[in-house]
Image (cartoon, grey):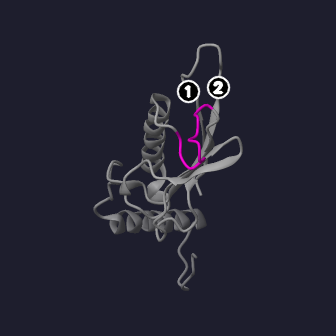
Amino acid sequence: MYIECIRYIPQVVVNQELIVDTTIGFMNGAPAINVQGFNVYHKNRSILPFWKVAMAKAEGVIGVLEANFIKPTHDKQDFERSSICQKLEMRLKDMTYEHWDLYCHFVGHQNKKLPHRIVPQSPSTNSSVALQQFKMNHIASVGMVSAAPSVFF
């Protein structure tokens, strides 16, 4: 739900130009399911399933990306902790929080950063005035008021 593709360009080597497309969104049933993280692939092989980069604030936000620019460990269960991997982790964390702030109120969470809506103090007064004006305009367009009761609506 509320899926978004974000392009990430890692600063690896000057000669190479890498572009990583990250797909991020809310999991179906997001308010009730406490799952978050990124599924990170290396050469089409799952290395880190549901890599948790953000804190509990971003529950329900999941993503997918293929990180061929990071070297996995020898057992293919994790990535080597390099500066490139740490930069990726920080960028994924930022993406998660940005996505959460933009779309969390659509899936049932409350966003405290959004301004509250201002509700008119007396909406019933405005609607009754509009109803009276409508009735007066209708009577004026008919030309005369009949003695028999009429239904306007």
The correct choice, above or below, for 128 with respect to 61 in the image is below
Would residue 74 be counted in the magenta stretch? yes
Which residue is label 2 attached to? Answer: 18
The residue that appears at 58% across and 18% down in the rendered structure is 13
Mark 1 residue element: loop
The residue that appears at 39% across and 69% down in the rendered structure is 128
Task: Locate residue 83, reporting x and y percent.
Answer: 45, 29
The earlier-in-sequence mark between 2 and 1 is 1
Looking at the rendering, the stretch of residues picked out in magenta corresponds to: 69-79
Q: Are marks 2 and 1 in contact (CB under 8 Å)?
A: yes
What's the amino acid at mark 2? Leu
| Number of marks present in the image shown | 2
Which numbered dot is residue 10?
Answer: 1
Would residue 60 be counted in the magenta stretch? no
Q: Quadrant of the C terminus?
A: bottom right
What's the amino acid at mark 1? Pro
